[in-house]
Amino acid sequence: MPFPPLAQRFEQLEELLQIAHRMWQGDETPYAGMHYQLVRPLNAPNSVQRPHPPIMIGGSGERKTLRLVAQYADACNLFDLPGTEFADNLPHKLAVLRKHCADLGRDYATIEKTVASRFTDTAELLARLRELAAIGFDHVLVTPGGPWDDRTLDAVAALLPAVHALAGTAD
């Protein structure tokens, strides 16, 4: 199976997003893109979720990925690797997304902002969760620096009351 160059994969992704949105709107008119041609795009059976299943796009590319998020997605997922440029650039990445939204006439607040983060120490994790919330992230997906063993699970479980307090949820 061929693996197209990155630019082509982005073109294909955008066409697929266009096709999906059209199908979810019931638009069965022909689609003629650079990579895909459909005589009658048909969405049958229709999705249960309305107006359509949520679309999450992961990545932090400023010119393509975050523009696709602003134009087509319901959520984005960025990457937070504490101690790296990824972590330091998160506020900038959200600012770029906000600018793309403004350029496209999209309400930035309608996009769920998620981030994947790694931790080795639960105290550091709680501090980082506070920072990520302050930056503007809605959800954080966490992975430990090692295996999900009983000790790690117990440590994370002990943090749950503080995490719920931070999120403003009861459980």
Image: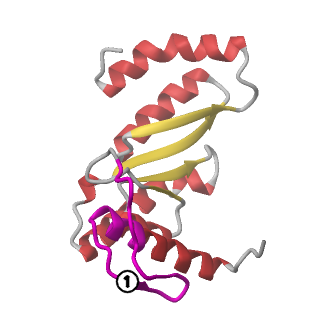
Q: Residue 6: image x %, image y %?
A: 65, 77
Q: Residue 89: image x %, image y %?
A: 51, 58
Q: Residue 124: image x %, image y %?
A: 57, 28
Q: Secondary structure at mark 1?
A: loop
- The residue identified by callout 1 is 30
Is residue 130 magenta-colored?
no
Inspect this view and state whether residue 30 appears.
yes
- Residue in the image at 37% along x and 46% along y: 135
Q: Residue 8: image x %, image y %?
A: 61, 82
Pick the front one: 89 or 106 = 106
Pick the front one: 162 or 127 = 162
Name the residue type under label 1. Pro
Above or below 7: residue 94: above
What is the quadrant of residue 42 in the picture? bottom left
Is residue 41 magenta-colored?
yes
In the shown orientation, is residue 45 left or right of residue 104? right
Q: Which residues are magenta?
A: 18-47
- Residue in the image at 53% along x and 68% along y: 61
